[in-house]
Amino acid sequence: MKPDVLRRFSVVFFWILLIFLAGLFFTNDFGLIDISKSTIITAVGIDSDGEEVQITAQLAVPKPSQSGENVEYAEVQGSGKTIADALNEINAKTGFYPKLHFCKLILLGESCRQKNIFQMMGCFYRKNYSELTALVAMCEGKAADMLAMKTSSSDMTSSVIRRALSDELKKSANASSVDLKDIAVDNFSKSGACHMPYVEANLQGTSENGGNGDNVGGENAGGQGGQSGQDGGSGERSGSSGESGGSGESGGGSGESGGQGKNEQKVEFTARKTAIFKDGEFAGILDEQQSFALDLLKNEIRLAVLPCDSEGLHYTLGLKLAGSGMKLKIEDGVPSLTLRFKAFAQIAGIRKPVEPDETSGDDDISPPVLAAAEEEVKNRFQSMVEASVAADCDFLGVKEELYKYNSDRYDELKDDVLKKLRINYDIQILSVN
Amino acid sequence: MKISVRQICFILIFYTAASKFLQYPPMLSAYSGRDLLFSALFGFAADCAAIWAVAFLSSRTDKTFYELLKDNLGTVAARIVYGFFAAFFILITILPLFEQKQFVHAVFYDTTPPMWVFLPVFLFLVYVSSKGFTNIGRCAEVCMPIFILMTIALYAMSFGEAKFSNLLPLFKTPLPQILGGSLRTSYYFAEPAYLLMFMGHYKYKKHDAAKLTLSYAAGAVIVLVFLALFYGIYAGIASSRQFAITKTALFFSATEMVGRIDLLALYVLETVMLFALVLNIQLAVHCIKTCSDFEYPEIISLCVNAVLLIILTVFNHDYTAIRRFYAGWVWIAVILFTIVIPAAAWLLKRRRDET
């Protein structure tokens, strides 16, 4: 039997415990932070400057406001031997230790082509920095300049870039959007290759002709970025970061995207090309058609637009209910890759005057047009495979397929599987009705 | 009887799974790669056999394991064995406790808080550890709906991102490596020892051995599905993703719009993880109480948790070293206490009580 005193003591103990816990609860600040003293990194631009990494962070700065816009956006730059060095500099400038949980975009500048991207971005794969959900893309020119460009639809340039990489565009084969996790999984597979969208800036309201129905973008705004870089905030950043030392403790200025630059030309972004990497090293850029083929093969497509020519007319077909895949077999000692694509098409446009009586038949496409569409898809697949072989970059994941499904032959074939590949195409495009 | 077979079944299903959601998947990925399921299967299969053996032993006697030891080997030997069991339960609590601390600090806080922020958990541990088998059973019943709902939610959010072909090809990892992965993570497998402690505290009925074994198998299936999801999502980088259960639902499309809704499920699931953790301490307290004839479990609980607190404080920054030690050596103790002793228990002479 327990003594009564112990029983009584336990009641008193638990009351003390309850009061103590209540004290802890009500004296805690719950990790709340003063919104007017905080900033959130929404995007990061990475440029390489010799041995150093330049980080341009687009910050969302919350402003207490009764009405209207209550967030301002600014870019702050840091540099150092590693991204962590650069982030530390940003910390010193903003007074807020930058965790990257809200960072939704990582933009690699063209200068990163000379470096191993997994060395440059290693920081994002380490504990507590990032959840690997941020979209990754390479851009033309400097990432810092692209993040400083002005758009008409939002003050937050990174959100406009993210729109060009959106899931909807991915499902329409207009962007090969990937996140940090995707590129790492691909790169650290047996294929040792990955890909990411290549973002281009075009002057707003411009569109170039050509491409036989494929959009080839507008007037290039790459120079505009450099121009604004010299005139506006990003120019200050570039200049001063050049002075930064190896320890990553100096350099960098900050600028606001709100219109300090003299060049007020607005831009829009597209990501219809794809940058490819082998073992983390830049290996080339796929053009729009090759990227389209890659998207058809890798992504779940809801509605893709395919231009094709048949019987002297130009057709634009909408591809729906698409299914795709690839299968690798070893036939007579030769690796044989079958690229499969099946979709249902309907006519979205024909280059001739519309006949109201005929539009009801848009879902019933004639066999020659379907054959032309199949040929077009095949040509794009072919072009994509040729790009892979030419760059010796297995972004399609052929070696991974070989290891998964023919692992007995993996060691024998892994070194030159791309060169030995025999390609088969199983492409079916059918009328919706 | 202090605990029912149904409650033990809940423990074997839900605590088995909840205790393996944090670091077990990345560690197994590091050791066994694409064949992590086989490493896990090996551990589960061995424990399934041990659980069946202990459950079936219960059908032959109404005595507790301590009484069996006392009748066969004498009081002193029984006390020594139970003393070792207490040490074993404390041993297999230490690393999961470190993991809980790191998990809370890394996932529930924006910036790493000081260590004392985690310490209030000891108030919970001291209180719950002082409770007996009746309390253990009731807690398991409370945890049951929480676990089911939250796990379904998290699995559903994770499923779309998983690519199960990442687990192919099968059996390419050398067998010694697969078995090595299983042994190096064996400190997550103490369930047969739990059942040995519950022996004689529940009323065995016909087919209960099958029920208990199947319950453990159900827990194993939950873990195996999670391992497949985790590796299906992260493939070659799985070993670098710490606190696995917090990483799989990140890519759910709705989180883009509404934020980390999976954290709600994780907060709730953390309750079950804590109860799964504290079960080890409860059993350590039970063993010390039984072998020492000391009447006050509250004081034993206080002492055991004080030891854990000291270890946690002294080795606060030595998690990696401790993990390496556990991976290298603790499997010996695990095999002894969860496989060898349950099997050896069959050698003890038993006689079903007539009362």
Image (cartoon, coloured by chain):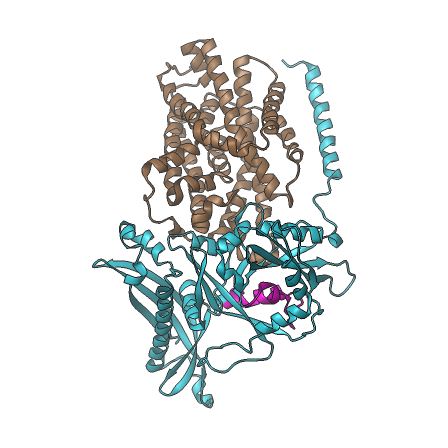
Chain colours: A cyan, B brown
Q: Quadrant of the N terminus of chain A?
A: top right
Asked if residue A159 is among those painted magenta in the image, a careful observer would answer yes
Query: Would you say B286 lies left or right of B338 here?
Result: right
Picture coordinates of residue A288, whole percent (x, y): 45, 72
Query: Would you say B86 lies left or right of A415 here?
Result: right
Q: Residue B46's quadrant in the figure?
A: top left
Q: Quadrant of the C terminus of chain A?
A: bottom left
Residue B214 appears in the figure:
no
- Say which of A82 and B249 sits in front: A82
Q: Residue A257's quadrant in the figure?
A: bottom right
Is residue A335 placed above or below A230 in the rendered structure? above
Picture coordinates of residue B251, whole percent (x, y): 52, 54
- Say which of A33 and B37 sits in front: A33
Q: Residue A416's quadrant in the figure?
A: bottom left
Total label count?
Answer: 0
Asked if residue B19 is among those painted magenta in the image, a careful observer would answer no
Magenta range: A141-169
Is residue A246 placed above or below A352 in the rendered structure? above
